[in-house]
Amino acid sequence: MQITPHIYNMHIDDGAVSHPGGSNNYFVGDPSGEMVLLDTGDHWREWTQAILNYYDELGRPNISAILITHGHVDHIGGLDRVHEATGATIRCHPDLAEKLVKILGSEDAVEPLESDEIVSVSGVTLRALFTPGHEIDHVCYYLAEDRVMFTGDTVLGASSTSVGDLSAYMKSLELLMGFEHSTVCPAHGPVVPPPKGEGLIR
């Protein structure tokens, strides 16, 4: 489903009690040119295949990078298959890089992000925001051109998230509140459009 001119959502009902409203994997960019993918779903084969089927529906665009929000299995479980299909470079928090290198068996396939790094794709930019709390290796991504915040598991669409470090989590929420956004695109649950998206993190 197309959400904005630059965002396409592959939504799946994964059946997890902890994921009311299902789960999302986002393709960002231009299907006729270059895109990035956020996360690779669980190792559950049907989930990974749904991502690859949606990739086919988009016309198999050049995937320049796979941006990982964090290292939980429902976000990196399909990494090997999706990487093999796309050849994309894996971008992630530095604390997660070694784990992903072991999964893929290649140091060249993984490039750690820097805090506040800008990832450019098809004329739009995604800013990598290190947001510990749910997990120490968590990254949210802000698409300024569409005023969209990809919140991973830091903020969900239909439920509360689990928090490992409350102090770090509250600081991460403060960081996210500093960006103008009208839409929240979470990893789980429905996309939250305006006007609710503007106030969800607050």
Image (cartoon, grey):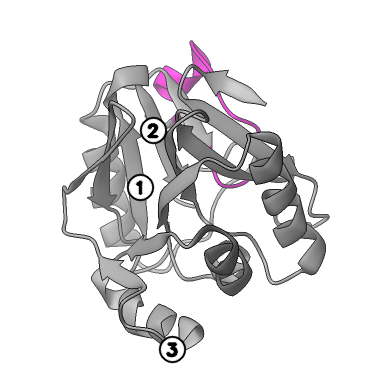
User: What residue does disc 1 label?
Assistant: 140
Which residue: 51% across, 17% down? 196
- Secondary-structure class at tag 1: strand
Measured Cα–Cα span from mark 2 to mark 3: 30 Å
Q: Quadrant of residue 131?
A: bottom left
Mark 3 burial class by Cα count in 10 Å: few <14, some 14-19, many 20+: few
Q: Is residue 178 above or below residue 87?
A: above
User: What residue does disc 3 label?
Assistant: 102
Which residue: 46% across, 71% down? 71
Decide if residue 107 is on the left or right side of residue 135: left
Q: Out of 51 and 72, give the one closest to the viewer.
A: 51
Quadrant of the frame with the N terminus: top right
* Magenta region includes residue 116: no
Query: Of helix, strand and loop, which mostly describes the magenta segment?
Result: loop
Instruction: Please report whichever mark, 2 or 3, sits nearer to the chain's N-terminal start.
Output: 3
Residue 44 in sight in this render: yes
Q: Out of 100 and 135, give the one closest to the viewer.
A: 100
Amino acid beneath label 2: Met
Contact flag, marks 2 and 1 (Cβ < 8 Å): yes
Amino acid beneath label 3: Lys
Decide if residue 87 is on the left or right side of residue 16: left
User: What residue does disc 2 label?
Assistant: 149
Q: Is residue 32 above or below residue 157?
A: above
Rendered location of residue 185, percent (x, y) = 51, 34
Q: Quadrant of residue 112?
A: bottom left
Amino acid beneath label 1: Cys
Mark 2 burial class by Cα count in 10 Å: few <14, some 14-19, many 20+: many
Instruction: Please report whichever mark, 2 or 1, sits nearer to the chain's N-terminal start.
Output: 1
